[in-house]
Image (cartoon, rainbow, N blue to C red):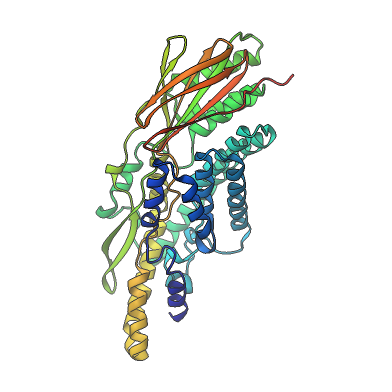
Amino acid sequence: MVVALAQLLGCAGSTVFQPYPEQASAWRHGIAQESAPGVRDTLARRARGTNELLYLQEMGRLAQLGGEPATSLEDFRKAIALYNEQDDEALIRLTGLGATGSALLTNDNALPYRGEDYERILLHGFQALNFWRLGRLEGAAVEFRRVTEEQRRAERRREREIADAEEKAREEGIPVHSLPEELGGINTAAAPVRSSIENAWLYYLAGVFREGTGDYNNAMVDYRRALQIRPELELIQQDLQRAEAKQARRHEPDRGLVVVSYEQGLVPPRREVSFPIPTRHGYIPIALPTYDPADFRPGRPMRILVDDGTTRETTEIARIDAMAARALADRMPGMLLRHTLRARARYEAQKRAEEWGVLGFFAVQVYNLASERADLRSWLSLPANTQVARMELEPGERNLKLSGPGGGASVDVPVVAGGVTLVRVTDAGARLQVSVLPVLEERQ
């Protein structure tokens, strides 16, 4: 108990006593107000200790939003290294639910942030875009390949973790199959997606990249993967058909392909909900993270006016907010189990507190107050949803006028016959940020 209390007090400046969404509220507002560089400096001072991975992810994303791909590349490189270190550790994953001893006497907020699978997958996707923006196409190809590899590994890992949680819950006699009413909003928020791991947006961008570099076979594979996730999207069907025609040399383009990738909004923060759970000692209160379904909304399309007078609209391809909710729903059986075991440990400590005298009793009270706080940490600079549009245009310098919920922008886009140009647009709520990535042309 003394060790656990020391751990909690030692993390007083982190997320144990001030939930992460509260810490992030100022800089999330700063993103929309074009103060990302100053925000990044604040995060850099905090990028150490238990939350290092979380802050590195935020820093890399903010550097991207600020038009600093080289800085973002380095931040994400460090974050990827931390994920790899976690893979190599011979420690029990908390979500593996073998937590005993001191792990049960430690608030989740005081433990190292391990990230979510959907975050790790997006991390590699963003890193691929950094490499592409810098013209380092081999690096981009490697990171797009890692997106696929991470999704496969995450699927196997998630199945194992859920099975472990259910088995441990049966052993402990803890019902985890039906969520308490207080947590019901998670499933509502997660409803738009079937998985937190499958990301059609990243598969689509990988297909665009591979098509642009002449790797038509793998482009078709990626388009098919995106289509499996979003089979109703005619846009992906058409891209797959075009890649197949190029592979068969049936398509000799005299126009250039322009793809607009639109990242809209910010993922909502988690919220804490407290409720009593029945145990053999009676009802014991616990606190868990959840989402408010009212914070989740479908994407609003962006309108694109081309200088030839034609217009397009973006189509939603991925709901990152719903993927975050689905990830939390998948972890909920394990969280219920772990928090129930922790509540039992708190109850036993409370019973023994009087034997330890006044100081011991005070220590237990402080621990109980601090330990029952939900872990609300998550990557909060991610977009709420992602959308895409594509058009085939005559070669030359073309102008696109963009109009979205967060404002408008005008951008000149180089178009090369047979080439692929990616226009990346982000909208965090107050303005559009636009970057044009280097044109891809089939390597001869």
Q: Quadrant of the N terminus?
A: bottom left
Question: Viewed as shown, does residue 64 lie left or right of 187?
Answer: right
Question: Viewed as shown, does residue 158 lie left or right of 16?
Answer: right
Q: How far across and down, in percent of the image, does residue 303 sit?
A: 39, 21
Relative to residue 281, is residue 41 depicted above or below?
above
Q: How many marks?
A: 0
Q: How far across and down, in percent of the image, does residue 393 sit?
A: 53, 12
Please state which of residues 331 and 298 is positioned toward the viewer in this rendering.
298
Relative to residue 102, is residue 117 depicted above or below?
above
Please state which of residues 379 and 152 is positioned toward the viewer in this rendering.
379
Query: Which residue is at 39% across, 62% downward?
Result: 337
Please state which of residues 255 and 33 is positioned toward the viewer in this rendering.
33
Question: Viewed as shown, does residue 276 lie left or right of 333?
Answer: left
Q: Quadrant of the C terminus?
A: top right
Residue 390 visible somewhere in the drawing: yes
Q: How far across and down, in percent of the image, does residue 354 sit?
A: 32, 88
Query: Which residue is at 66% across, 11% downward?
Result: 249
Q: How far across and down, in percent of the image, does residue 5 sit?
A: 43, 77
Residue 221 visible somewhere in the drawing: no
Q: Residue furthest right?
A: 444
Relative to residue 444, is residue 432 depicted above or below?
below
